[in-house]
Amino acid sequence: MIEFPTVLDDLMMAQQPILKRTKEIFGYELLFRGKDALNANISDGEIATSQVLVNLCIGITELESQLRKPFFINMTTDLMLSDAFFPIDPNTVYIEILESQTITPEFFDALKRWRSAGYRFALDDYQFTAEYQALLPWVSIVKIDVLATPPEQYSTEIAELKSRGLILLAEKVEDSAMFELCKNLGFDLFQGYFLQRPELIKGKKIDSATHGAIELVNALQNRDISIDDIADLVTKNPKLSYQLLRILNSPVCGVAKTVVSIKEAVIFLGLVQLKKWALLITMTSSTSQPSSLLKVLLTRGRCCQLLAENSKSASADSAFMVGLMSGIDAVFNVEKSVVLKQIALDKNVLEAIMNQTGELGAYLSQALSFEEQKWDSIQAMSPAERTVLNRAFLDAMLWSEEVMLSIN
């Protein structure tokens, strides 16, 4: 795994991406927690507070320089009120203020100091209550939980926020219908699971283009297939040929080499790597889904793979397949069981995807717990397991960013 600062073991939890109206990734929300069962526990005193901030910012800078996206962070009142130095570019973060924040003159003074230093604020979980309107002139973004605060009931208030020039972020957007409603009401940013959940159409079948891609993937699952046969298959797919050559010369692959033929590229990559990249590229070329969905699945697959590698498992490549394929229904908008029947997957892989059983299913379950913020499940892990999962997920985020740059 990537060598992150040790502070990330205890203080950082990566959350869902935050998306634009185009479903491109705008940024990420991060949670900071201590060792005490994932609850914030900041020591008193300016020295301790300053040290937390310094460590925190080392971690953020490490990620921001590679992800190139702003982060949303929840900051405690103690940290806001302290005079601690915050050693990070204001353009890197949005500091979230909880609506439950106690509004005091001291808090407003701190808010003014941070704003004068260039930092931007988001008001989290806003429910249109009068006592928090005083915060609106000081924030750039207003986050609204659309499950707790149904937006269709507040269209007038939403329009008023828009008229003030505020950016509106819809939280807990669970499906495409809510995404479209929020877009129509004027929301600018979106956070939730709508991207990973398919808009299933009953009776929908896999189209011919997708079926052709799946045939290629199936051929690559054949352990007896020859290098020449694979080279022929790849050559018949111009996009696959082009993408494989790009990947071969990408840092993602690990080794750069100039090749003179598709067959040489196939030999150099090796069958295991070729199967992985072929599946990835056929998924991207056979769907109209946004690239941000593929990035989510890549992160999930890579996280599963890293968890397997940390366990010294011989099934690390299968773990990657399980993570990636676990969202195949969202990619093709077809029921998972329908898609998976078309693909020649090992029984253990199939069971892991469908039921999260066995060794491979355990890796997928851990990755999903992290991705979906299932804190009860994470809390049940040992501190060592949480550290491994945290680092695996953060590593996977950075890796998937590099992959997307390579194949787009």
Image: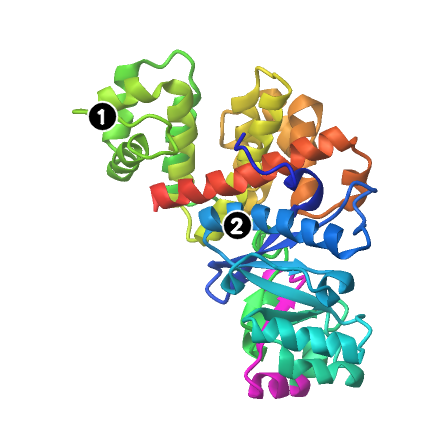
Q: Position of residue 118 (x, y in %)?
A: 54, 71
Q: Position of residue 355 (x, y in %)?
A: 70, 32
Which type of secondary structure does the marked residue at label 2 adopt?
Answer: helix
Number of residues whose C-alpha sits closer than 10 Å to that of mark 1, classed few (under 14), some (14–19) or many (20 or more):
some
Q: Position of residue 389 (x, y in %)?
A: 66, 34
The quarter of the displayed image where residue 176 is located: bottom right
Image height check: is 404 above or below 240?
below
Which type of secondary structure does the marked residue at label 1 adopt?
Answer: helix
Q: Is residue 137 magenta?
A: no
The extreme front residue here reads 47
Image height check: is 339 above or below 30?
above
Residue linked to disc 2: 61
Give the camera-side residue of 29 and 11.
Answer: 11
> In this rendering, would 171 be left or right of 223?
right
Quadrant occupied by the N terminus: top right
Name which residue lies at 65% across and 77% down: 112
> In this rendering, would 110 be left or right of 249?
right
Residue 171, labelled with which disc?
none
The quarter of the displayed image where residue 374 is located: top right
Residue 262, labelled with which disc?
1
Q: CA distance from mark 2 to mark 1?
A: 39 Å
Name which residue lies at 68% across and 78% down: 152
Residue type of the residue flagged with mark 1 = Ile
Image height check: is 305 above or below 206?
above
> In this rendering, would 69 be left or right of 143?
left
Q: Is residue 168 magenta?
A: yes
Give the magenta range.
Answer: 156-177
Number of residues whose C-alpha sits closer than 10 Å to that of mark 2, classed few (under 14), some (14–19) or many (20 or more):
some
Name which residue lies at 56% across and 37% down: 4
Give the camera-side residue of 341 and 37.
Answer: 37
